[in-house]
Image (cartoon, rainbow, N blue to C red):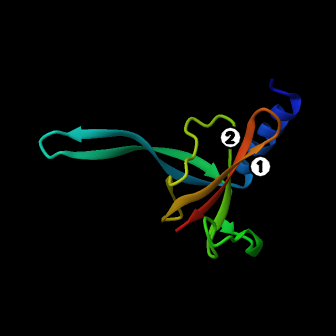
Amino acid sequence: MVTTLDTKMRLLAQSLIEKFGTSATYAYPSSTVYDPSTGAATKSSTDVTWTISPPSRVRDRMVDNDRIQAGDFMCFLAAKDLSYVPALGGKFTWSSDTWTIVDLQPIISGDQIAAYRMIVRR
């Protein structure tokens, strides 16, 4: 059941990220096509534009030297009105660099996801 808090938190996350965020292009994996003549599978992707918080370095206390490493970055993505949700291993381009999502945590305000915290690596 969607609560008032869900509605408010999703709008707040979206509003703040749109106001202070920046554009990034996510390469959403859309299909895999098999070529019988070569025996190879070719993956294709669809580019989707997101507004994310600018990536900032992770805090030392977040580093576990497993999934999150020193030198990784963290950014946020509002969940409201997303047509494509992020995935571990997904890639996006921001500021001419390609970033890989190495950790992904939903921020839940009740029954719905308000935003995603993404740990990313260049």
> Mark 2 belongs to which amino acid?
Ala
Q: Looking at the picture, does residue 24 appear above or below residue 33?
A: below
- Quick one: 85 or 22, which is closer to the camera? 85
Q: Residue 93 or 99: which is nearer the viewer?
A: 99
Which mark identifies residue 79?
A: 2
Image quarter where the N terminus lies is: top right
Residue at 73 percent of width and 55 percent of height: 20
- Residue type, mark 1 in image: Leu
**Secondary structure state at the residue bearing disc 2:** loop
Extreme residue toward the left, this view: 37
Label 1 secondary element: helix
- How crowded pointer 1 is (Cα within 10 Å; few <14, some 14-19, many 20+) is rated as few
Residue at image coords 53%, 46%: 49
Residue 94, given in percent of the width and then of the height, sits at: 54, 60
Q: Quadrant of residue 73?
A: bottom right
Most extreme residue toward the top, as rendered?
Answer: 1
- Name the residue that disc number 1 marks: 16
**Residue 52 x, y percent position in the rendering:** 64, 53
Residue 96 located left or right of residue 109: left
What residue sits 77% from the left and 72% below the top? Answer: 61
- Locate residue 84 relative to residue 10 in the image: left or right: left
Residue 74 quadrant: bottom right
Residue located 55% across and 38% down the image: 84
Q: Earlier in the sequence, mark 1 or mark 2?
A: 1
